[in-house]
Image: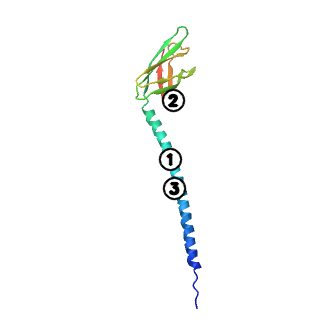
């Protein structure tokens, strides 16, 4: 006489359920992790794209640089924003072979298609060439060589 045991069938069902629950939990964890990685990558890509597109649309020209000496020597630098977006100037540097003058600009916003003139105290000497180096908030650098 044989006795059939129902224990084997029950253990197969329990094992199958445990494997199913474990698979669902691990799968959910992987989906949440990959979703987080994707959203971080999307955010970085969006920021990088916007920064690069805006930097390429920055078109700044050093339109004029004239030299004055009343009451003391100075250089007046006129910048023209020919681009389609506003530009913020953060720094203007004037240098020659012996002297560098670096001026941080606090109110350097130039709207599109507008000009901005900045008077910079600088003890220039006649016939010694100077370099004017303008830096924007997005990191663009515009350079021009002038001579008094």
Upstream in sequence: badge 1 or badge 2 = 1
Residue 124 versus residue 19 in the image, above or below: above
The relative height of residue 67 versus residue 59 in the rendered view (above or below) is above
Q: Which residue reaches farthest top?
A: 71
> Which residue is at 57% across, 67% downward?
18
* Residue at x 51% of width, y 29% of height: 137
Residue underneath mark 2: 137
Q: In this view of the protein, which residue sits in the foreground, 59 or 51?
A: 51
Marks 1 and 2 sit apart, C-alpha to C-alpha, by: 27 Å
Give the number of the mark in front: 2 or 3.
Answer: 3
Q: Residues within 10 Å of mark 2 (few under 14, many from 20)?
A: some
Q: Which element is circle 2 on? A: loop
Give the camera-side residue of 33 and 93.
33
Q: Helix, strand, or loop for circle 3?
A: helix
Q: Which residue is mark 1?
A: 39
Please name the residue that numbered disc 3 is placed on: 31
Circles 1 and 3: CB distance less than 8 Å? no
> What residue is shown at x 50% (from left), y 23% (from top)?
108
Q: Residue 27 location, x and y as percent? A: 53, 60
Q: Distance between the Cα atoms at labels 1 and 3?
A: 12 Å
The N terminus lies in quadrant:
bottom right
Q: Tell me the element at label 1.
A: helix
Name the N-terminal-most of marks 2 and 3.
3
Label 3 near label 2: C-beta < 8 Å?
Answer: no
């Amino acid at each position: 006489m044989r006795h059939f045991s129902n224990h084997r069938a029950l253990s197969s069902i329990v094992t199958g359920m445990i494997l199913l629950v474990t698979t669902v939990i691990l799968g959910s964890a992987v989906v949440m992790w990959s979703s987080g990685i994707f959203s971080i990558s999307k955010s970085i890509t969006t920021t990088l794209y916007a920064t690069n597109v805006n930097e390429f649309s920055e078109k700044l020209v050093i339109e004029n640089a004239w030299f004055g000496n009343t009451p003391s020597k100075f250089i007046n630098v006129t910048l023209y924003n020919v681009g389609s977006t506003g530009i913020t100037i953060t720094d203007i540097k004037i240098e020659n072979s012996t002297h560098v003058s670096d001026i941080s600009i606090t109110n350097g916003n130039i709207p599109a298609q507008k000009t901005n003139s900045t008077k910079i105290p600088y003890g220039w000497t006649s016939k010694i060439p100077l370099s004017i180096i303008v830096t924007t908030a997005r990191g663009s650098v515009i350079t021009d060589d002038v001579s008094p």
